[in-house]
Each structure stands twice: as C-alpha cells, then as structure tokens.
Amino acid sequence: MLVEGGASAAACAEQVAAIAAAGAELIQLRDKNLDDAGLLERAIAAVAVARRHGALLVINDRPDIAVAAAADGVHLGERDMPVLAARRVVGSSRLVGRTAHTIEEARAALRDAADYLGVGPCFPSGTKAFETFAPQTFLEAVVSEAEVPTFAIGGIEPQRIAQLRALGLSRVAVASAITRADDPAAAVASLLAALREVS
C-alpha cells in the first residue's frame, strides 16, 4: 500500500497507522513534492508507527532517506538508480524493490537480486497516466520466472483482483485506491477481502 507525505508528519503517521491496522503488511512512503527534511521527518514518524503495527515500511526512490529513517527498505522505479547501487547504500539487511514494465526489466532486477518486483501497469490508474499496459504474456512470464514476491501495480481495485489471480498474481500494490479514498482503512480492508475471496 502506498501513502503520501501529507500535510505533516503527524498526518502521515496517522494514515500509516490506519492502513497498517487494517492489515497492510508492506507500506511505501512516496512524495515527490517534499524537500529532504520534510520527507525524512515523515519517514521517521511513519516507520515508528508501522513497526508498532507489525508492518514493513519502504521509501520510494530514496535509499538515503530509507537509511536515515531506519526504514525497512527502498522501492526503485525504472528511472531510479540501479538495484546494485541502491544495495550499496541500504546494505544487505534492507529490502530493495524494483518496478518492471517489461520482462527484460524484470530479469535485470532479478539478476541484481531485487527482493521483490512491482509489475505493470495492469490497468488505468488515478495516480499516473500510462500509454500502454502490461500484456498478459509479460505478467505470466514474470510469475513463472520470479522467485521473489511480485506485486501487480497500476489501477488495482477490488473488482480486478480475480483477473490478476487468474494470471498467478497474488499480491497487489495500491496507490490512489487508498490515498484518494474517503476511508483509507476501509479501502485496504476491501482489497484484502477481495484477495481472500479468490485465494
């Protein structure tokens, strides 16, 4: 599940607490508009709250912030630093995740020992505009080749879970369905219920 920095560290921590309490196991903090000090402040608060609820928290794009905040890892997009470079920053004990839009990107991330993958985009998203979407053959290939947790990304909503499970994807990464929901905790619970229904 993805959260944004929000208006303050307290607001960010409150959102993390709500979705962690609802059952989210891995939470990503992403905010491209905050300066370093603001992002670090929110990351420290978010990590503390996530730990209390038994959830993992990773920082988007910023391995340095992940280390400074004692986060559980970093998530890298396709335009971010390579997995191996991030590993040198965060060390071997933290997670390094990678987004992959093609099987070649996925294989490269796996060769570099990424701890998990985000694959897609699977559907139209309220967070990002995509020109193309991940073909079924790509998603099936990743599922068959990857020996690390693989998350479907892009436009994930409860009614689309069964379609993803049919392809072998049992994990999802969610942004706008949570951050733009009137009740983020209820949105998390709805997604988890949909995953359990088709398990």
Image (cartoon, rainbow, N blue to C red):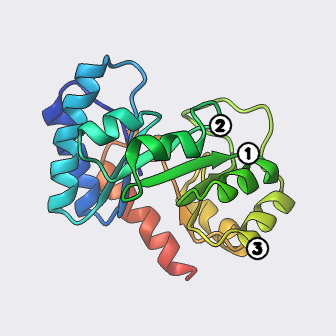
- Name the spot of residue 196 as percent of width and height, x first: 48, 78
Q: Disc 3 or 1, which lies upstream in sequence?
A: 1
State which quadrant residue 42 falls in: top left
Q: Disc 3 or 2, which lies upstream in sequence?
A: 2
Labelled pair 3, 1 in contact (Cβ < 8 Å): no
Number of the label disc, if any, that sits on residue 112: none
Residue at position x 32%, y 58% in the image = 56
Q: CA distance from mark 3 to mark 2?
A: 21 Å
Nearer to the camera, 41 or 20: 41
State which quadrant residue 132 falls in: top right
Say few, some or many: other residues with alpha carbon within 10 Å of mark 1 (under 14 / 14 to 19 / 20 or more). Answer: many
Whether residue 67 appears in this view of the structure is yes
In the visual, does 96 lie left or right of 131?
A: left
Q: Secondary structure at mark 3?
A: helix
Q: Secondary structure at mark 2?
A: loop
Vertical comparison of 2 with 11: above or below: below
- Tell me the kind of residue under disc 1: His
Say few, some or many: other residues with alpha carbon within 10 Å of mark 3 (under 14 / 14 to 19 / 20 or more). Answer: few
- Tell me the kind of residue under disc 2: Glu
Number of the label disc, if any, that sits on residue 101: 1
- Name the spot of residue 77 as percent of width and height, x first: 58, 38
In the visual, does 103 lie left or right of 52?
A: right
Vertical comparison of 71 with 170: above or below: above
Nearer to the camera, 63 or 25: 63
Nearer to the camera, 61 or 127: 61
Residue at position x 22%, y 48% in the image = 47
Q: For the view shown, which residue lies furthest in the front direction? A: 88
Labelled pair 1, 2 in contact (Cβ < 8 Å): yes
Number of the label disc, if any, that sits on residue 144: 3
Residue at position x 32%, y 49% in the image = 184
Number of the label disc, if any, that sits on residue 78: 2
- Name the spot of residue 123 as percent of width and height, x first: 69, 47
